[in-house]
Image (tube, rainbow, N blue to C red):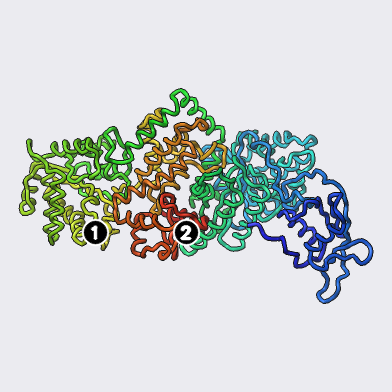
Amino acid sequence: MMPDVTDSVPEHIYTWVDVDAHLEKLALYKRWPEWLHECDAFWDGLEVTVAPAVSAEEVLRWLGERFGVGSIVRDEGPPALRLDDIPGRPSRRLLPITINHREPEAHRREPRWRERRIVRSLGEPLPPPESHLPHGVRIAAFHSYKGGVGRTLHAIALADAVARKGGRVLLIDADLEAPGITWMLAGHGKRVDFSYEDFLALLHASADGRPDEAVSLGAAYLPNQAFDNVIVMPTRRSLADIAPPKIEPTDLLTADRPIYYLTESLAELAAALHASTVLIDLRAGGSELSAPILLDPRVQRVFVTTVSEQSLHGTERLIRELGRRAPSRKGDPASAIIITQFREQADRSLVIEAAARLRDAIATTLQPEPNEGEDMTVDNDVVVEPTLSAFQDHLLALPANWDAVIALARRQQLPQLLETLAEDLASPPAAAESADESFQQKSSEDELAQRRERLETFARRLAYAETADSTGFLPTESLRNLLTSHRTEPPLCVVVGAKGSGKTFTQVQMCFRETWQGYAEAVGVDNVTLDARLAPVFVSRHLQDRTSERIREVQKLACASPGAEPASQLELRDLIDTSLRSPLSDLEWRRVWLTCMARAVGIEASPEDVEERLVDFSRTSTRIFLIDGLEDLLQEFVRNDAQRQALRVLLVDCLEWLRSLRGRPLGLIIFIRRDLVQAAIKQNSAQFLARYRDYELKWNPAEALRLTLWVTQQAKALSQVASKAIRQARDEDLSRLLIPVWGEKMGSPRSREARSDRWFLAALSDFNGQIQARDIVTFLAESAAGSVSDTRYTDRLLIPSAMRNALVTCSKEKIRAISEESPQVGELLKRLDALEADKKRIPFSPNSVGLSSEELEILASNGVVFREEDQYWIPEIFRHGLAFKVVGRPKILAIANQVRQRNFD
């Protein structure tokens, strides 16, 4: 926030320096009157330049108000400003005041912390650069308020990460007072022919203000100081010289040079070295050695801090000052935060608070203003998401040479920690733009609007399993695990999945393939020798008639004998409903479930003889039973003891009985939601779930991106990518393959907007770290629909505004779907939705929303809320549909990212 200096007077005025500082402060925060043009304080007086029509009396009255009662002396001679003396003694220490009347002169503002002239324009930002950095070079500068926080080590780790991604990096040690990288280079024994001091001196000596000579000499010598793809420019050639530098960056700020001369010259040097990235390790603190670089908004600022109050407060103040002097504009790179040296468990609350403060500082000072009507909550979340680098003993004392430092950083996985920054910096913008241009040309030929319409139509059909067909599906790791673990014998397992994770869809796709081998072939798992028909027992009530008929055909094919007729879904449901109205033992419930399985394959059995009938059947046949839709059968499972008993017997006793059969000829796959399992198995539910963890339908970030790519390709909206390529693509390649779908960023490739893939993951994930398949395809359908008529973005299928608007629709649809599948959760959401508008605020307490701790625990288990101390938060995928407003967003985002990092790592 802007400090209030309107009514404040300086506590002490000892010298002209205090006078100068107070007048500068007033100018910075626009507290000067319109008629005041310039103030210059010196050891022997204060000169004030004002408009010609302003009287001396008005000038002195204003100065008196700003410096306090009795501060202006007019007894004899010229007026003067009274300076402080020893307390209790009348001060005779005076600073004469001279008032000059003239029109304001043109004044050149320069990127310095300490302004050379105190003029009214100090209240305005520095003049913005007129163009991008030359040659599309990207510059990132590492800065810390305090030394010893790991700034240099993380700069080196990022250089290594970018280089390993194929980028060529110019790494500069710009700490002219306490070099760090320079010592590592010296310890390595590599000869140093060219340094940062050399570059500054050559730039300073340039007669015409051109950097050509400095660039050509640097390009000639610096390649000899390269480590693979990292070219190192140390501070100086010899560490024997510990004197201050003869030429400082601010010495280049002469009238014949542009004010951003240094950063533009560094970009020219990088281009001459064929490097697309420049990383600069700056001097710590508020040093003028760093000012010309930090105050260029085209430079990506990377702030490194610990959670200590001194480091944190200084970093926060610096960010706010940068936001005032050199705010970011559309197209400028996003600032980044690295929080270091904290203990993961002991300092968790400190990390959350630190991330919140720094996120707030960046979001309110260095973030461009959103367009009218745009909800940029998720964008700000992703763009200013801090990187957390926990304390590691091995990093306390760094080795003396370059290779050893790189090896240590890799062992401690620092390059992987900085993956997001490395992705942004690794490839030059031209590469992304050329990819976009290629897609633009292709889109023009195939009519982009039709591609978007095809994506909308196909995604809507996939949004619910009941509208799916047998055209195909994307095999996930859990499906492959299910098949590779059961190549020769039938599976007896529970497939757990959250709401919308694809349980019903998976069962339907299995049924379409009719046999276990047929399903294995569709998934792409070889050497499955088990020849068993798939026999659906219970299916979702909401399947379309066409899908239900197809499954009925599969049931007939799986019957025990030709001509046998499988029981209908209605008959089987009636059997369960009737049994629920009678007090049954666990043994009796086991026989009820087995009877349902037997009748599903046409065996006329009753609970009294079903076990014998199934044993006889298993001696000559193999079947794999499939059960889904249990939430339809057991809608009161939370409150109804009989329903929980029935469910527990199915999950435990039935599977154990089938395992007891000699040769295990019969299989059973139960598709079920996690909350049903936890309600049925009160003790050791975690152990039970762990037994089937490999088969859980859990969409991690990589698989969520892969599904997005697959849906787009299947819709023939991205035909140039083959299905096999999607399945075999490495996780790190998915973001690149998705650029034609939604662009590299939520804006142009050069913008400082959030990366589209990270925005997508943050927007759709809940507080269990889950991203559901249904939410993904709904999002694609809504985004495509909103993009059809757009003509501005021809380089991608989905436009940013449509993606942001789709989040609102997805949130409402997710709430509706959950309410249908889980009436208990739906009722709680309905109560939240019905709250008065002034109560829909995040964070909230249980009392403010009228929910008990037990009810909130149900929501928490479904990822709808997250508890931090005594307050609760709601993720974006639910917040929009419930119309909750955000209060204190920075802390919410810090917590959300802590939860996501915990679940995704």
Q: Residues within 10 Å of mark 1 (few under 14, many from 20)?
A: many
> Quadrant of the rendered structure where residue 849 is?
bottom left
Q: Confirm whether residue 187 shows in the render.
A: no
Viewer-closest of 243 and 471: 471
Report whether 130 appears left or right of 645.
Answer: right
Report whether 881 appears left or right of 41.
Answer: left
Q: Confirm whether residue 803 shows in the render.
A: yes
Helix, strand or loop status at disc 2: helix
**Which label belongs to residue 344?**
none
Viewer-closest of 175 and 4: 4
Give the residue at x 73% y 49%: 112
Report whether 692 appears left or right of 282.
Answer: left
> Measured from the top left, where is residue 15 in percent x and y?
82, 63
> Measured from the top left, where is residue 645 in percent x and y?
19, 59
Which residue is at the far top?
445
> Measured from the top left, where is residue 767 in percent x and y?
40, 54
Q: Residues within 10 Å of mark 2 (few under 14, many from 20)?
A: few
On screen, residue 65 above or below 413: below
Q: Which residue is mark 2?
A: 838
Looking at the rendering, in which quadrant would you find the N terminus? bottom right
Q: Amino acid at mark 2?
A: Asp
> Quadrant of the rendered structure where residue 834 is?
bottom left
Q: Are marks 2 and 1 in contact (CB under 8 Å)?
A: no
Q: Determine the CA span between mark 2 and mark 1.
A: 38 Å
Q: Which residue is mark 1?
A: 680
Give the residue at x 45% y 61%: 844
Give the residue at x 15% y 39%: 555
On screen, residue 445 above or below 378: above
Which residue is at the far front?
836
